[in-house]
Amino acid sequence: MKTYLSGLVVLLVAFSCTSTSQKTETEEMEEPKATIEKSVFGTMPNGEEVHEFKLKNSQGMEMSVITYGGIIRTLTAPDKDGNYDDIVLGYDNLDGYLEATPYFGAIIGRFGNRIAKGKFSLDGEEYQLATNNDQNHLHGGVRGFDKVVWASEAVEGENSVGVKMTRVSPDMEEGYPGNLTVEVTYTLNNDNELIFDYKATTDKATIVNLTNHAYYNLAGGGDILGHELKLNASKYLPVDETLIPSEVVSVEGTPFDFTDYKVIGKEINEENEQLKNGLGYDHCWVLDESDDALTFAASLVEPTSGRRMDIYTEEPGIQFYSGNFLNGTITGKNNTTYQFRSGLCLETQHYPDSPNKPEFPNVVLKPGETYSTKTLTKFLVQKD
């Protein structure tokens, strides 16, 4: 009898283990996966369709990207209570982006930021670009990469989804030499990381400085003055009244010292020539060098929600823009009026006016070379 009972116990234990194993395998199979869907977002005046890709990772973060301008239209992130809000500025429909817009969420190129008087020399030849920012060239010109429809395809990985966008910028587009073949990939993975990969090749020497111009508000609304910012930069580039830099200086003892977390609104209204020139913060910080493959660039925290984003990059600089030109004249998503400083930009990039500053890091791309740079933004939650 004891032998029979012992055998029964063994069988029950074995069955229990098998059932648990099978359940675990089933549960693993049912874990949410990253997904991507494509749909028509709108139609350009010339009849060309603009598509929207909706990406969702296994954690619940969602992002939508439209092929016009490679624009990140929406991006949700969790707060400390697990609630998701859209943390980027933008529009509900294509018409908003086709009207005058401050580059919400777009790919910026061929050259992000400003070039003094729209002029530069390369291989003994002088080039004149459009002057679309008073006397200077800004963000690629009148019809930069933010105002074109990109060819696109979904990219699916084991733990991620993404969108790869490509186009050929023809020789002398907006005044830039060379046929430039560009590839930009956005990847959202299951670790709540958003990765930007930029690549380009050319058939003639040219200049390249690509970035993304998303406007973030980690609170999901209101202004950004209560956000806390840390920049891995002991130096920055002061600018003249037209926002062109001339030299690299220390941030020490200035309102531009973000070497430790500081509330953005703490010193933004101080009497300071640089703050006056930028109408607030609209400057490029020189990132401190590291031996890491991706250098830590910035950390942004919104203390009420607990949302935090950390930025790592291969770029030498980061432009922090505090939304100084938002003035209540733009109505965006969900009928929201974007007031003064209701969003901020953290654009990893080479320095402004680099083509005219040989002492700045090189921005020249030649035939046979590949422009390749990566930026990673990780989204986290701080409980306290």
Image: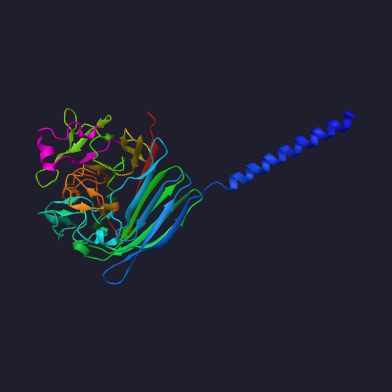
Check the image and name the residue furthest to the right. Answer: 1
* Percent position of residue 297, x then y: 31, 38
Residue 378 appears left or right of 13 = left
- The residue that appears at 14% across and 56% down in the rendered structure is 118
Residue 309 x %, y %: 35, 39
Residue 37, picture quadrant: bottom left
Instruction: Give the answer, above or below, for where 243 lies relative to 233.
Output: below
Tell whether position 264 is magenta: yes
Instruction: Find residue 251 and report its image quarter.
Output: top left
Rendering quarter of residue 379:
top left
Q: Quadrant of the N terminus?
A: top right
Q: Residue at 25%, 56% (x, y): give it.
A: 110
In the image: residue 204, left or right of residue 120: right
Residue 110 is inside the magenta segment: no
- For the record, the magenta segment spans 263-289
Residue drawn at 42 percent across, 61 percent down: 38
Relative depth, front residue between 179 and 380: 380
Q: Which one is in front, 218 or 34?
A: 218
Instruction: Give residue 187's position: percent from left, percent from top.
Output: 41, 50
